[in-house]
Every structure is written in C-alpha cells, then in structure tokens.
C-alpha cells in the first residue's frame, strides 16, 4: 500500500481513538455532550481530520471510495463542519458518533492490518 495512504489511514485511526478517549470513564450522554462546548469542538476537529484524510486518500487512489463506507458523506461532513459551522446540528454529530463512527473504526482496522 502507498505509504501516504497508510499514513492517512493511521491519522483516521488516531482521530477515532481520540474521540473514543473523550468519553472514557463516563457514559456517552447526549445531553452532557451538548452542554460541553470544548468536547463538541474537539469532536468536530477530529471529524474534520477524518474527512480531510479520506479526501486525500480518495484523491490519491479512487478505489478507496469502495473500501470506506460513506466516504463521500464523511468528506461532506468535513466540509460542513469547516464551511457551514453555523449549521452544525448536535443531534447529527451525535448520531454519527453512535452509528457511523464504529463502522468506520472497524473498516480502518481492517485496512491498516495489511
């Protein structure tokens, strides 16, 4: 595998691990998340990193669009967080953390084992 792609995959893995670490030792509670501005900004920043890394991977090798579920949606989220920051929905980000991030984590684990 291309060394740059592997580096970006590990960047994604690290960003997911960081998001997971924000909730270590406590239950994932939407209302606590919604009230904690610093936590929200940290999560959003890691989602930006994930989206940018996926964008770079796909630009370098378009075959990865089929290896990462919802790759275009992840890139779209990154663009929304950066460019339409005033339209970010806490509920949307929370559903991404609950539903989509675990799937992405599993896919990245597989891709980084090769």
Image: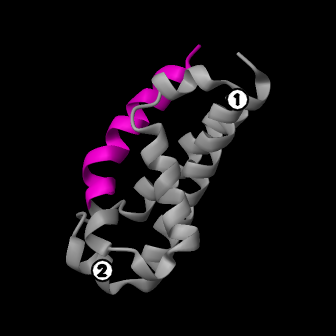
* Boundaries of the magenta span: 95-114
Vertical order, 76 against 5 (above or below): below
Residue at x 63%, y 50% (from the top left corner): 52
Tag 2: Cα neighbours inside 10 Å, few (<14), some, or many (≥20)?
some
Vertical order, 92 against 71 (above or below): below
Q: The residue tagged with tag 2: helix, strand or loop?
A: helix
Q: Main secondary structure of the magenta part?
A: helix
**Label 2 to label 1, Cα distance in Å?**
34 Å
**Which badge, 2 or 1, comes first in the chain's sequence?**
1
Where residue 85 sits in the image (x, y, percent)?
A: 50, 77
Tag 1: Cα neighbours inside 10 Å, few (<14), some, or many (≥20)?
some
- Residue 112 visible in image: no
Where residue 16 sits in the image (x, y, percent)?
A: 48, 48
Circle 1 residue? 5
Where residue 40 sits in the image (x, y, percent)?
A: 43, 75
Circle 2 residue? 34
Q: Quadrant of the C terminus?
A: top right
Vertical order, 50 against 2 (above or below): below
Vertical order, 14 against 88 (above or below): above
Horizontal side, residue 36 vs residue 72: left or right: left
Q: Which mark is residue 102?
A: none
- Quarter of the view holding residue 36: bottom left
């Amino acid at each position: 595998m291309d060394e740059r792609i592997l580096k970006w995959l590990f960047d994604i893995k690290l960003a997911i691990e960081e998001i997971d670490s924000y909730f270590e030792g406590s239950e994932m509670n939407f209302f606590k998340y919604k009230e904690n501005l610093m936590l929200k900004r940290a999560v959003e920043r890691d989602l930006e990193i994930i989206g940018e890394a996926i964008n770079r991977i796909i630009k370098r090798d378009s075959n990865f669009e089929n290896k990462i579920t919802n790759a275009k949606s992840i890139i779209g989220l990154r663009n929304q967080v950066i460019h339409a920051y005033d339209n970010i929905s806490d509920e949307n980000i929370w559903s991404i953390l609950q539903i989509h991030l675990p799937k992405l984590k599993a896919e990245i684990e597989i891709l980084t084992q090769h």
